[in-house]
Amino acid sequence: MASDFVSIGALAGHEGQQATLKGWLYNKRGSKSLYFLILRDGSGMVQCVVNQQEVDDASWQAAGEATQESALAVTGRVVKDERQVGGFEIQATAVSLISIADDYPISPKAHGVDFLMDRRHLWLRSRRQWAIMRVRNRIIMSIHAFFQERGFIQMDAPILTENAVEGTSTLFEIDYFGQPAYLTQSGQLHGEAMAMAFGKIYTFGPTFRAEKSKTRRHLTEFWMIEPEMAFYDLNMNMDLAEDFLVRIVGDALRDCKAELAVIGRDTAPLERVQKPFPRMSYTEAVDLLCSDETLAMLDEREAALHDEKAALLDERKENQKIYGQAKKWQKKKIDAREIEINQRLDQIEEDFRNIPQWRASAKHFEWGGDFGGSDETLITWHYDRPIIVHRYPAPVKAFYMKRDPDDDRLALGMDVLAPEGYGEIIGGGERATDLAFLEKQVADHNLPPEAFEWYFDLRRYGSVPHSGFGLGLERTVSWICCLDHIRETVPFPRLLGRLAP
Ligand code: 4AD
Ligand code: MG
């Protein structure tokens, strides 16, 4: 059966015609004989003009009664209007209420983050969240397209597992009929088994980390994409990761222009995500981190923040001066700007608190340690696109990594670090193939050998060089949308201290 209504995203195909739309009231303005209803239906937004002269009494009354988030059906003529959101306007001939909404808790004025997070089930209807979720969807489709076009098979790894993959400190333990089990940290080990069966595979599923860290890039539940390839060495793995990111970013730039504009994302840094990505060893990255150049960049950044703070304080003073005599619409504008200024000032103060630690961490960083978030940020400041760091000290990487044949202290791991302060979005490497080495690694990491017997079989029966990596979907969305915090990248984020809604 053909649908009896048209979605807002498909209005272009109905220009000049009558159409019925079904959606929710996002916003409303009115005068004596006119209402301007902004309708949203998930596919887009459109302004519906309701003229008392053009509609019957019931329609006029429905438009008048409709509150924010009431559900409506609007019938009218689809008119092209470049000035309007979405490029169309509806000249209504009929309006009917499907359901009337109670006083909606989320108003266009700014709310605190906790308030919004507690109402995430409603917050998702806001324009900015709409844009972010659509970018997420675009990225998901690009990921599948990229791998499917290259002959990879998508395979799901189990979520309930017997073993740790990425260290035992971040495992969520559950009771599996009296036996301890864990929510998976990564599908990789099962991915390796599938790669030995199918050559090139990728997993795409939820993964869990009992991260006690409250940062802007940690979730306890996140989606990971893990390709695993038989007969790939570290270099082939890095080449694939590079092609992969170029593809994802390119697709988002091409297909999500409107969404990125809603979010206010400056797309210039994304345009620069082109091959080749700079590649450096961990040792080279440490040298860069500890260099005078890095410390000079920090000084410059601090000075720039001082200037920005002074300018914001001046602007606020000016606004306060004119506020008394300002018109109502000007006051509204000043109020909105005040919220922005306060948010930015908070961020600047946080940077002022952090910069001394960043400086200390960079100055005193010792070869052998793992990079923290700030170290990654400082290293990436030197470049205009993602970078790949490879050959880390083995102790900071997982048990399954192959050692560098040229230097046994090193593991053949690689991380891709995103620019603009986002840091690690991909972690991966070449896998150890030597059975005796792996058995010893499992023992040295205090892992139960029984749980890895099946994994050892992969080295007993037709062992081959192989590699893979994991991309964190939410970290990628956060970077591509340039968000302050990872919590907005997933419909219902799970974080330390947040399990609802
Ligand atoms: O670097 P990680 O821990 O690597 C693995 O799990 C490997 N087994 C992947 C592989 O080689 N198949 O995690 C991979 C990526 C990180 O780079 C990051 O993007 C994301 O997963 N990630 C998280 N994202 C959000 N919240 C967290 N707590 C995350 N931990 C890791
Ligand atoms: Mg990692």
Image (cartoon, grey):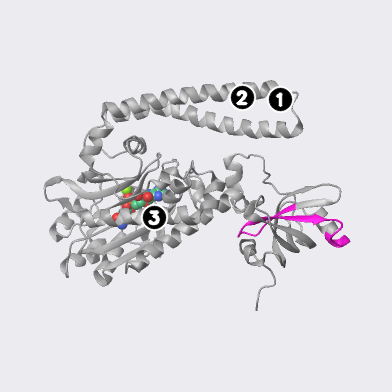
Residue drawn 70% across the image and 63% down it: 22
Check disc 3 and report its element: helix, strand or loop. Answer: strand
Query: Residue type at mark 2?
Result: Arg
Q: Disc 2 to disc 3, how far (Cα)? A: 51 Å
Could you tell whether 317 is left or right of 202 in the image? Answer: right
Residue 348 locus on image (x, y percent):
49, 29
Could you tell whether 439 is left or right of 356 in the image? Answer: left
Is the residue under label 3 in contact with that under label 2 (CB below 8 Å)? no
Q: Earlier in the sequence, mark 2 or mark 3?
A: 3
Residue 437 locus on image (x, y percent):
14, 55
Check disc 1 and report its element: helix, strand or loop. Answer: helix
Q: Which residue is mark 2?
A: 316
Q: Write the start and end of the magenta stretch as one range.
A: 37-59
Pick the front one: 389 or 314: 314
Residue drawn 16% across the image and 51% down it: 403
Query: Residue type at mark 3?
Result: Glu
Could you tell whether 401 is left or right of 82 in the image? Answer: left
Check disc 2 and report its element: helix, strand or loop. Answer: helix
Residue 391 locus on image (x, y percent):
21, 46
Residue 325 locus on image (x, y percent):
75, 24
Q: Earlier in the sequence, mark 3 or mark 1?
A: 3
Say few, some or many: other residues with alpha carbon within 10 Å of mark 3 (under 14 / 14 to 19 / 20 or more). Answer: some
Say few, some or many: other residues with alpha carbon within 10 Å of mark 1 (under 14 / 14 to 19 / 20 or more). Answer: some
Q: Which residue is mark 3?
A: 173
Q: Disc 3 to disc 1, how far (Cα)? A: 57 Å
Q: Is residue 226 visible?
A: yes
Rendered view: 339 above or below 14:
above
Query: Residue type at mark 1?
Result: Tyr
Pick the front one: 91 or 205: 91
Q: Farthest residue toward the bottom?
A: 1
Q: Which residue is mark 1?
A: 323
Is the residue under label 1 in contact with that under label 3 (CB below 8 Å)? no
